[in-house]
Every structure is written in C-alpha cells, then in structure tokens.
Amino acid sequence: MSDQMSMGATMRSTPGGLHLSISDRPDADRFEAQLDGQVVGWQPYRRYRGHIVLLATEVAEAWRGRGISSALIDGVLELVRAAKATVAPRCKVTADYILRHPEHQDLVPEQYRSLLQPISRPQPQIGHRESRFSAP
C-alpha cells in the first residue's frame, strides 16, 4: 500500500461510445477504469526512482474487445504527464500503445525506450473461406 497522493482522474470514451472514468488509486497501487461506478479495467504500477512503472493492463473478461484498454492507457498517460512524471512501460500492450502514439513517447526516458516494442496482432484473412467439401 502506498502513502503517495493520487495523480487524479480523467475521462475517456471508447470508439463504441463507452464513457470511462480513469483514476489513480494509490492505496491499491493501480489506475482503474470505471463505467457507471463498476471497475472494468485496471493497470497496476510501482514507483521507482521518480518513474511510474506501468505493469500489466487488465480488462474484466466481460468487457474485453471494446477499446477499454486503449482508453485506460491513454487516460493513465495523461495523468502521468499532469503529475510531471515519466513512465517505464513494463506492460507489452502499454509499450505498443506508446509506440503507435508518438505524442506520448516523450514520457518514456531514454533508458526505457527499448521497452517500446510492437506486439503481433493476427491479420484477418479477407475473402478467404475454406470449404469442407471438394469441388467435383
């Protein structure tokens, strides 16, 4: 448990129109995304030598695939910036998000830039349909 002051709260919307409150919970050492008062996502963190070490981004199973992790990460980065802190993204999803959003890369000190790596995403196969039946 931390005795640090909260970095505050902000609002974010997902592409599907979910309106989330993103807040720092220093008593739990994590950021939380809430929808209508229900915690639907969270990102634990640790403070290390003036940096915020962002750990695994989690979204409740029932809420996955709706853009909550991106909204959570974006809100977290805003709160970290407002607190005049920097980040060490130990979460691969967070590191990939920062890599794809250059406006946040200044939050990552040079010694942690190697953590910014893309994650692989399966590519949908458009127009490819396998048939169980062979042609005559």
Image (cartoon, rainbow, N blue to C red):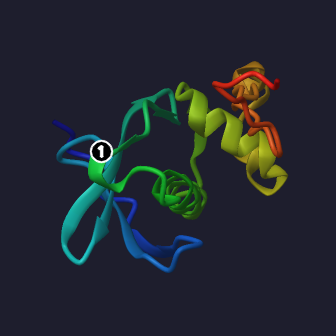
Asked whether 107 or 14 is in front, the reply is 14
In the rendering, at what x and y percent does residue 47 appear?
41, 33
Identity of the residue drawn at 68% across and 44% down = 97
Tell me if residue 28 comes above or below residue 13 in the rendering.
Answer: above
Residue 29 position by quadrant: top left
Tell me if residue 40 comes above or below residue 54 in the rendering.
Answer: below
**Residue topped by disc 1:** 61
Identity of the residue drawn at 26% across and 49% down = 26
In the rendering, at what x and y percent does residue 87 appear?
59, 38
Left or right relative to 43: residue 112? right
Q: Amino acid at mark 1?
A: Glu
Circle 1 sits in a helix, a strand or a loop, which is it?
helix
Residue 22 position by quadrant: bottom left
Asked whether 116 or 85 is in front, the reply is 116
Asked whether 58 or 125 is in front, the reply is 125
Tell me if residue 29 comes above or below residue 17 in the rendering.
Answer: above
In the rendering, at what x and y percent does residue 30 appear?
31, 44
Identity of the residue drawn at 50% across and 27% down = 49
In the rendering, at what x and y percent does residue 51 appear?
54, 35
